[in-house]
Image (spheres, rainbow, N blue to C red):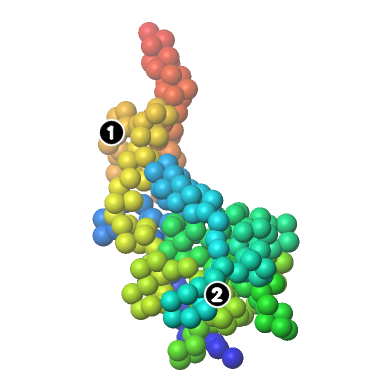
Amino acid sequence: MAAAGPVEPSGTRHPASWFGDLWAGGQSRVRSLPVVTPLAAQRHATVFACCNVIAGDLAKVPLRLYQRMGPSRAEPVVEHAATYLLNTESAPGVAARLARFALVYAFALRGRGYAYAPRDGAGELTLLDVIRPDLCAELRDGRARFYAFEDGAGIQRRAPSRAMVHLRYMAEDGWTGRSPLQVAAESVGLALAGQEAAARAASGVQMRAVLKMEDVYEDDEAWHRNARRARNALTDPEAMARCTLRHWRRP
């Protein structure tokens, strides 16, 4: 049975490298830029539109199964489990186009897409169960590959590579995919930072003044309390209006 190798624990303040590779697209060398994660990147309209269009267009194309009859001849196969699962219903209650959309969307966004494809006693495919990428871990035992995941029924499983569909992007080692977000972390981070700055400007929350606070206070709590008051007065339009009104009414 395959087992994962020893993994050092990771904190969140200074995460280990594997933590960023698993959950995030990458952190730019410019620390002020936001960390690019698949969930954060989806909030950008361009990233969402690209993944949605690619997955939607590929899900519309019917897939045909062919059987090789010789070195230069192949014939289409109609009555086969794979043909039904790829074009009609991939799992009970899940349309094949929806499953293919989910697979390609995860592939375009994360560089990885997984589906569980078990077989019955006769070796025939029984279903094509799309697995959430963040619930699937890749394990290895020498050259053998295994997957630990939670299937659509909520059951924890460990399956060999022959029972899995694994879409991977830019697999430099032939196996592990790379997320496009990880490759272009700085570019996507700039886009996310620009979008956040525009949202803050549109909401009216922006810098109005610079305050220089005294260095001498009774204790740290007094300093923090005064800082919170100043921040609330600058960021809350109603508080700013009340402050202006009080100053205007003074004799």
Q: Earlier in the sequence, mark 2 or mark 1?
A: 2
Q: Residues within 10 Å of mark 2 (few under 14, many from 20)?
A: few
* Circle 2 residue: 67
Q: Which label belongs to residue 210? A: 1
Q: Residue 40, can we see it?
A: no
Query: Which residue lies at the image location 43% right of the left edge and 19% below the top edge?
Result: 241
In the rendered view, tell whether residue 150 sits above or below residue 185: below
In the rendered view, tell whether residue 216 sits above or below residue 205: below
Q: Position of residue 245 (x, y in %)?
A: 42, 14
Query: Which residue lies at the image location 50% right of the left edge and 83% below the top edge?
Result: 145
Eye-nearest disc, 2 or 1: 2
Q: Residues within 10 Å of mark 1 (few under 14, many from 20)?
A: few
Q: Secondary structure at mark 2?
A: strand
Residue at the top extreme, as displayed? 251
Side of 85 where 35 appears, left or right:
left
Q: Looking at the rendering, in which quadrant would you find the N terminus?
A: bottom right
**How far apart are the alpha carbons under marks 2 and 1?**
73 Å
Query: Which residue lies at the image location 50% right of the left edge and 65% below the top edge?
Result: 113
Amino acid type at circle 2 is Gln
Q: Residue 177, can we see it?
A: yes
Q: Position of residue 104 (x, y in %)?
A: 49, 58
Instruction: Report which quarter residue 227 is drawn in.
Output: top left
Amino acid type at circle 1 is Val
Between 216 and 56, the residue placed more toward the observer is 56
Between 98 and 236, the residue placed more toward the observer is 98
Side of 181 where 153 appears, left or right:
right
Q: Secondary structure at mark 1?
A: loop
Between 118 and 46, the residue placed more toward the observer is 118
